[in-house]
Image: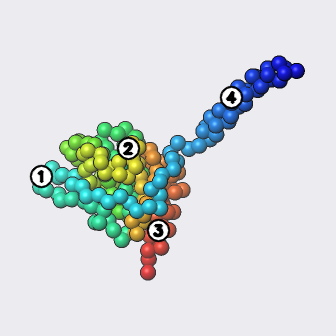
Amino acid sequence: MASSFGRTVRFAVPALVFVAIAAFLMLGLFRDPQKIPSPLIDKAAPAFDLPRLATTDGADPGRLSSADLAARPYILNVWASWCAPCLQEHPLLLDLAKRRLAPVVGIDYKDEPAHARAWLARHGNPFDAVASDRDGRAAIEWGVYGVPETFIVDAAGLIRYKHIGPLTREVVDRDLVPLIQRLSSDRAP
C-alpha cells in the first residue's frame, strides 16, 4: 500500500505543477501586453529639464521643463525618428493635435536632433513642444520601456494614464480622448 501511495504522489505532483504552469500561461494569453501596470499612475510626473529640439537655423531654442507644463493637463509622447511604430501612430498624434484637447508634448528619445527635425518636417509636427532626451535619462525616470509610449498628465502634475507601444484609433477614442476631456472639465471654473 505504501508503494502504491508513493507512485501516486510521484505522478500527481508533476501533473499538478504542470496544470498550475499551464493555467498561468493561459491567463497570459488573455492579457493586453500594452497594459503593463505602471507604478507611476496617480503619482507625480517625474520632473525634467531638457533642451528643446534645436532648430535648423542654429539658434538656441531654450529648454523645456516640467514646470513649463504645470497647471494644465497634457499629453506626453516619447518617440524617436528611428522608431518604426512611432510612424505608425503619428497620424493619430496629428489628429489629437488638431483637436486641441490638450497640449501634445514630445520627448525625442536617444535620437540625433537633425534626424528628428527631418522626420517631423517630412511627416508633420503634432507637438506643441519637443524636448531632446539624447541620453535617455528622462525617459528612464518616466519608466519608459521603449518607444513609443504615451502618458496623460493632469493639471496637478499626476500621471493618470500610460500607454506602451503605438497608439491605435481604438485607444485614442476609448481611453485618451474621454480622459483628457474629463481632466479638462475638472479643471474648468
Q: Tag 4 or tag 3, which sits nearer the N-term?
A: 4
Q: The residue tagged with tag 1: helix, strand or loop?
A: loop
Closer-to-camera residue (115/27): 27
Q: Quadrant of residue 118?
A: top left
Query: In the depicted view, which residue is nearer to us: 165 or 117?
Result: 165
Q: Which residue is under mark 4?
A: 18
Which callout, 4 or 1, points to the residue nearer the camera? 4
Up-down relation of residue 129 to residue 139 (above or below): below
Q: CA distance from mark 3 to mark 1?
A: 37 Å
Q: Is residue 167 left or right of residue 19?
A: left
Dot 4 crowding, Cα within 10 Å, few <14, some 14–19, many 20+ = few
Quarter of the rendering occupied by the C terminus: bottom left
| Distance between mark 4 and mark 1 Cα atoms | 64 Å
Q: Earlier in the sequence, mark 1 or mark 2?
A: 1
Residue 158 x, y percent position in the rendering: 42, 64
Crowding at dot 2, Cα within 10 Å, few <14 / some 14-19 / many 20+, comes out as: many
* Amino acid bearing label 2: Val
Q: Compare residues 155 and 101 and report the one nearer the observer.
A: 155
Of pointers 3 and 2, the one earlier in the residue sequence: 2
Q: Which residue is mark 2?
A: 147
Sequence-wise first label, 4 or 1: 4
Q: Which mark is residue 183?
A: 3
Which mark's residue is nearer the viewer, 1 or 2? 2
Rendered position, 127 above or below 187: above
